[in-house]
Image (cartoon, helix red, strand yellow):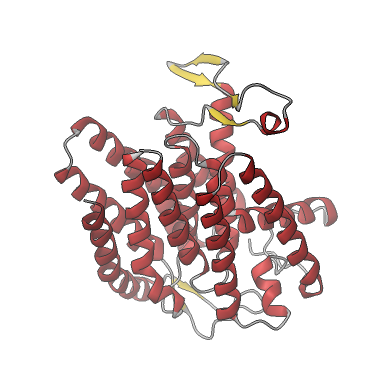
């Protein structure tokens, strides 16, 4: 079943991406070059996320046809369509009409709230005090305060953590989407590592969904890496959203996901801090402060920058897969240290802000 669903998502994505590319050309969904932020040589089709979305959903439908648990598979399919659909709709509107940031953020919020309303959330997270002998409980429990709200049961801290986690990953991947193949490749790496993690933990459903995500983005990757079509708003936000959900469906994967996506997450937080604190400006301003742009400014080719960032995600993801417990804490410290070094080395690559809104 694993191989069948991976192959289904891969083949569907390989077949649907050229069709979406043709439609995007004809319908005027193009990303127009606008140096210094967008240095591609000609208008390039967007809407890559649409091809990935349909590959993902159709593969889930195939899983529904061959799996036995009808209640769970129907719930999974409905949730995927409802939550991911907000991001696809918002992404299509943004690719066409270039929405301002306050309108862009509506769709990720709706996607995250849909997941929370479905009862999915992270009840426990790792307690760092346990590993230094200051606590007897290895977990911090978030599900201790429940509120009834218009017929819904709101578990305040669980739902707040889930919302912030999903929004953080959505925007980290959105900000990362600046070089051909970067987000697609990291999504493939992340979903495959989360597949093995879920399998090791005996979490069958997250393992299945992880492989489907990997297949859908891998089928899109050759077109994207060659610069023939871009992910668009929907494809980049969908990547962070799906990886974020896999990390919280079943316990013990938050730290693995953070190790895989640590560079884009830390880069996003650092750039947002600079925009708000240093520049007193909107955190959604577009500029070349992001690490992947600064690597180019320092003389690295786009292909080498992409490969380097893929390698960092793969290395920390694999280390997280093979080491556990307090070693994850050391890996997180090492990741922060690496990011600090990269920021220091590429500092002179920073240029002035340019508003993308």
Seen from the viewer's position, the closer of residues 26 and 235 is 235
State the quadrant of the C terminus: bottom right
Say whether residue 350 is visible. Answer: no
- Residue 78 relative to residue 193: left or right: left
- Residue 264 relative to residue 13: left or right: right
- Taking the spot 44% from the left edge, 80% from the top edge, the residue there is 226
**Taking 291 as reference, is 128 above or below it?**
above
Measured from the top left, where is residue 168 in percent x and y? 59, 46
Say whether residue 139 is visible. Answer: yes
Seen from the viewer's position, the closer of residues 213 and 290 is 213
- Taking the spot 47% from the left edge, 34% from the top edge, the residue there is 251
For this orientation, the residue located farthest to the right is: 278
- Taking the spot 60% from the left edge, 27% from the top edge, the residue there is 138
- Taking the spot 51% from the left edge, 64% from the top edge, the residue there is 183
Measured from the top left, where is residue 28 in percent x and y? 40, 72
**Taking 234 as reference, is 330 above or below it?**
above
* Quadrant of res 117: top left
Measured from the top left, where is residue 32 in percent x and y? 53, 77
Measured from the top left, where is residue 232 in percent x and y? 47, 64
- Residue 168 relative to residue 116: left or right: right
- Residue 235 relative to residue 162: left or right: left
């Amino acid at each position: 079943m694993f191989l069948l669903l991976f192959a289904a998502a891969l083949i569907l994505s390989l077949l649907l991406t050229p069709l979406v590319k043709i439609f995007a050309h004809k319908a005027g969904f193009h990303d127009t070059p606008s140096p210094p932020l967008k240095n591609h040589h000609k208008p390039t089709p967007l809407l890559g996320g649409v091809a990935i979305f349909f590959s993902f959903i159709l593969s889930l439908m195939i899983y529904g046809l061959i799996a036995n648990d009808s209640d769970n598979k129907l719930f999974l399919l409905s949730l995927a369509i409802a939550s991911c659909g907000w991001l696809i709709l918002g992404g299509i509107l943004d690719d066409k009409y270039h929405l301002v940031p306050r309108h862009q953020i509506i769709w990720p919020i709706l996607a995250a709230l849909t997941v929370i309303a479905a009862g999915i959330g992270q009840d426990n997270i790792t307690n760092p005090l346990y590993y230094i002998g200051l606590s007897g409980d290895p977990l911090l429990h978030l599900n201790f305060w429940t509120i009834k709200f218009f017929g819904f049961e709101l578990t305040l801290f669980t739902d707040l953590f889930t919302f912030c986690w999903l929004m953080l990953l959505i925007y980290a991947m959105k900000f990362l989407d600046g070089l051909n193949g970067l987000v697609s490749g990291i999504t493939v790496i992340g979903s495959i590592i989360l597949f093995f993690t879920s399998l090791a933990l005996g979490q069958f459903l997250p393992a299945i969904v992880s492989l489907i995500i990997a297949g859908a983005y891998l089928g899109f990757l050759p077109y994207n890496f060659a610069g023939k079509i871009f992910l668009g708003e929907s494809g980049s936000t969908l990547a962070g959203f799906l990886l974020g959900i896999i990390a919280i469906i079943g316990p013990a994967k938050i730290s693995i996901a953070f190790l895989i996506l640590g560079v884009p997450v830390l880069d996003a937080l650092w750039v947002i801090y600079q925009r708000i604190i240093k520049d007193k400006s909107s955190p959604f301003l577009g500029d070349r402060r992001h690490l992947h742009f600064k690597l180019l400014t320092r003389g690295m080719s786009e292909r080498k920058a992409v490969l380097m960032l893929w390698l960092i995600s793969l290395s920390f993801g694999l280390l997280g897969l093979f080491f556990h417990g307090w070693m994850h804490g050391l890996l997180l410290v090492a990741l922060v240290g690496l990011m600090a070094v990269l920021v220091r080395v590429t500092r002179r690559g920073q240029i002035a802000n340019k508003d993308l809104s």
